[in-house]
Amino acid sequence: MHKFVSFFGERSPMFEELNQKTEVYAKTRGIEYVWVPQVPYDVESVVQCLNEADAGLIDVEPYDDRIFNRLNDRCKLLVRFGVGFDKVDLKAASAHGLCVARTTGANKTGVAEMALTMLLAAGRQVMVNRNTVNSGKWVKNVGRELIGKKVGILGFGNIGIALAKLLTGFDCEVVAYDICKNEVAAKALNVRFTDMEEIFTTCDAISVHLPYNAQTDHLINAEVFAKMKKDAVLVCTARGKIIDEDALYDALKNHRIAGAGLDVYATEPLPADSPLTKLANIILTPHVSSQTYESIWNTYKKAVDIAADFFEGRALDPADLLNPDYKERLKEGK
């Protein structure tokens, strides 16, 4: 039986329950599942655990030669809990013959639901009105409805598609941008593909679901905010560095856009002295869009399935496999 060590989660009743559930499920797939939560993260513990296991379930911390150079030949697979992999050195992993995968789509509903929540809350000025109540001054700030508005989705993968599905009850005009166009999903959900220029200049609400890479670094910047409608709202549940936070602060402070919602940041945790925390027209959450019981369980379950399929010799879904070139290193006899 192959051993799968998991580093994701913290010591709490909910995670205890979920990991017991995962351990039971893993046995049905012929996998020995061991949970070793890394809170706080400890590289020494991670290296030791991976050297005693066949696969590892990893979180958002960096995984590179600092770890790979110290691994023996036993560990063959790393599975990212979630979809972002910008902190995993895929080239280095391949050089060591390590397969790296991710749990694509497992948390899509949780993230899409949070994006919709932020779109609604930003439009209705929930934080502004909460501060009004706290102040004791009964001022009724006027918000805007999402019903019937034009919504732009940047990134029409699993999460973007899930958001479009949630929006079907809002009678919105939904447009999307993605390099890879899922025409079948778009047609089924009445979504029209367009370019980023149309989304930035004409949409009432924009939700970001793009991956972070060299092309998307600070993609949404001062130039973009200058193009957006003054009553537009922007939310991001993808990766923090896609948005220029200084430009966003300036746009919100000077009311160039109406509101925003962020669940991700360039630096996490978001520094307590960040100027964004001083604004009333932004909703800030601590990278929790995927943190629902249902999404976490779906992700644990999919991670186990990926590990079981891998060791049973089944081909992994191309959307989940991040470095198919690892096989070349294995052929060399690692």
Image (cartoon, rainbow, N blue to C red):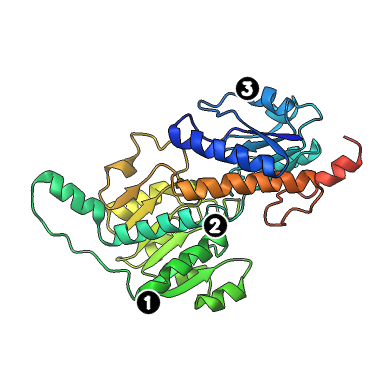
* SS of the residue under disc 3: helix
As displayed, is residue 92 above or below residue 11? below
Q: Nearer the viewer, mark 2 or mark 1?
A: 1
Q: Position of residue 242 (x, y in %)?
A: 50, 51
Res 116 → quadrant: bottom left
As displayed, is residue 74 above or below residue 87? above
Q: CA distance from mark 2 to mark 1?
A: 24 Å
Which residue is tagged 1? 171
Residue drawn at x 78%, y 43% as measured from the top left: 311
Q: CA distance from mark 2 to mark 3?
A: 32 Å
- Under mark 1, the amino acid is Asp
Q: CA distance from mark 3 to mark 1?
A: 51 Å
Extreme residue toward the right, this view: 332
The C terminus: image quadrant: top right
The numbered mark, 2 or 3, whose residue comes first in the sequence reads 3
Q: Are marks 3 and 1 in contact (CB under 8 Å)?
A: no
Q: Position of residue 295 (x, y in %)?
A: 50, 50
Residue drawn at x 8%, y 53% as measured from the top left: 138
Q: Is residue 60 visible?
A: no
- Under mark 2, the amino acid is Leu
The N terminus: image quadrant: top right
The numbered mark, 3 or 1, whose residue comes first in the sequence reads 3
Residue drawn at x 66%, y 44% as measured from the top left: 304
- Under mark 3, the amino acid is Ser
Q: Nearer the viewer, mark 2 or mark 3?
A: 3
Give the label on residue 210, or none: 2
Extreme residue toward the left, this view: 137
* SS of the residue under disc 2: loop
Which residue is tagged 3? 45
